[in-house]
Image: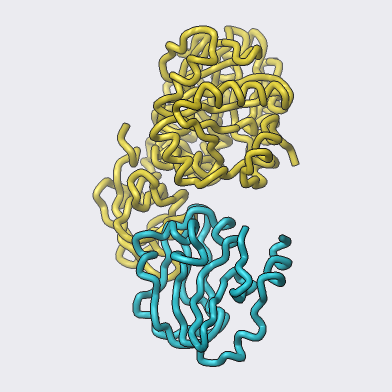
Chain colours: A cyan, B yellow
Amino acid sequence: MNFPSNLKYTKEHEWVLVEENIGIMGITDYAQGELGDVVFVDIDPSLSAVTKGESFGSIEAVKTVSDLYAPCSGKIIEINKLLADNPEVVNSDPYGQGWMVKIEISDLNELNDLLDAEEYKKLIGQ
Amino acid sequence: MKKTAFYPIHQKIGAKIVEFAGYLMPVQYSSIIAEHKAVRNSVGVFDVSHMGEIFIRGENALKFVQNITINDASKLFPGKVQYSAMCYPDGGIVDDLLVYKISDGEYMLVVNASNMEKDFNWMVENNLFGVELINASDDYSLLAVQGPNSKEVLTKVCQSPLEMEYYYFKYDCIADTDVLISRTGYTGELGYEIYFRGDESTAAKIWDAVFNAGKDYNIQPVGLGARDSLRLEMGYCLYGNDIDKSTNPLEAGLGWITKLNKDSFIGKDELIKVKEEGLRRKLVGFTSNEKIFPRHGYALMFSGKNIGYITSGTVSPILEKPIALGYLEVEYAFPGNKVDISIRGKEFPAEVVTLPFIKK
């Protein structure tokens, strides 16, 4: 399993790539493996903002449904349209094509309690 | 936690293991959807050794089986298999099962792993005929080989030709081990189930023989995840989801195995009453054009009124749309009827359809 060191991670098994005040987020390699085949990614296309820690959508996999939690608060500037017809990229490329939303982060201090790759690996017992 | 004789192989090839019915079982190897398609398009192999094998022996074996199961076991002859069920006196289902007639004095009942102890105790309690009851579940392994190419693959490893009709069985020998092989399965595809006794090394030899024979067909190991989606595409019931002690076989669409005209059997009187009074609800199939994933327990609605619930659901890997089984109040349970599935507070349109979802 792969956990790039340039990403931040949440305890809810999401990753964020932060570039200045923009955060791109998705779910981790571990999360996609636990969920198994992703069938739908359900994010309201009219979603305009998210609040850290709150659910903003869900992932339907063959075995279970899982909520998506915002890793930080902010304005939604893009939702990955590829996922509507190709949800399987969440399994095949969780850190690339499988990204979910781009967030204009409203408070960078919110990122301080996210985990780095080493801490995340410890969390999942790797 | 129990392990099947194939457990070391599952570990070696990297299966994702889950606890199921007291066993450590493979839920998937690569991807549930890919494994599902391998069975529909070519051939897949399932370790289902967790299933229970109970032998009934004695001169009253048939009387015992007739009394405890709802199908007519007198129609069986040696080498024939029958799908059946056991009911409580109130008509609720103890379990669904396969009945194998070995000989006049011997039957093998194959039951769900999750019900094995309950079923065996039920049989002991209802042994009015002095038959010998042997729970041989721990001694037997069971490998299912399913898919359009299963016959070609198994012909290579069996000693005699595999000319068998659906729901027949015979004895053969695979990798120097005696096996009972039946043309049965839970997938709707051409397929076989192989019963044998033996330890992990016997199991490994049989596994290797089958996979070597299947190389040209891209044979794949298949976990419990795809087993569930395959049976659901066919509309087959799963005990614990679609049927249980609170459901009777008539409302579950199992009227075809409920032989109310045979001599007395446990549950008969109540089931006759149910039939005479008319069903209150029925297990039916649903599909939807929405992007939803129906799951066990979701409510079924009509004009805002709760009229039933989903018992099993998935997104069909073959139809690429949601499919589900569920109970509906009988006046709503007709093909073409439009109902709503309630998912986390939102309602999505769905339609009642005839089963199976996939026409074979």
Number of numbered discs? 0
Residue at the (39%, 64%) spot, across then down: A83
Residue at the (49%, 46%) spot, across then down: B32
Residue A23, image x, y percentages: 50, 81
Q: Is residue A68 above or below residue A40?
A: below
Near-viewer residue (B296 or B337): B296
Near-viewer residue (B277 or B28): B28
Near-viewer residue (A46 or A119): A119
Residue at the (61%, 71%) spot, across then down: A12
Quarter of the image that includes the C terminus of chain B: top left
Name which quarter of the figure residue B283 lies in: top left
| Residue at the outermost left position | B336
Residue B249, image x, y percentages: 46, 36
Residue B321, image x, y percentages: 34, 52
Describe residue A50's horizontal placement relative to residue B119 as left or right.
left
Describe residue A16's horizontal placement relative to residue B330 as left or right.
right
Q: Is residue B355 visible?
A: yes
Name which quarter of the figure residue B290 lies in: bottom left
Q: Is residue B315 above or below residue B170?
A: below
Q: Is residue B77 above or below residue B340?
A: above
Q: Is residue B273 visible?
A: no
Residue at the (52%, 87%) spot, across then down: A20
Name which quarter of the figure residue B52 lies in: top right
Quarter of the image that includes the N terminus of chain B: top right
Residue A28, image x, y percentages: 57, 65
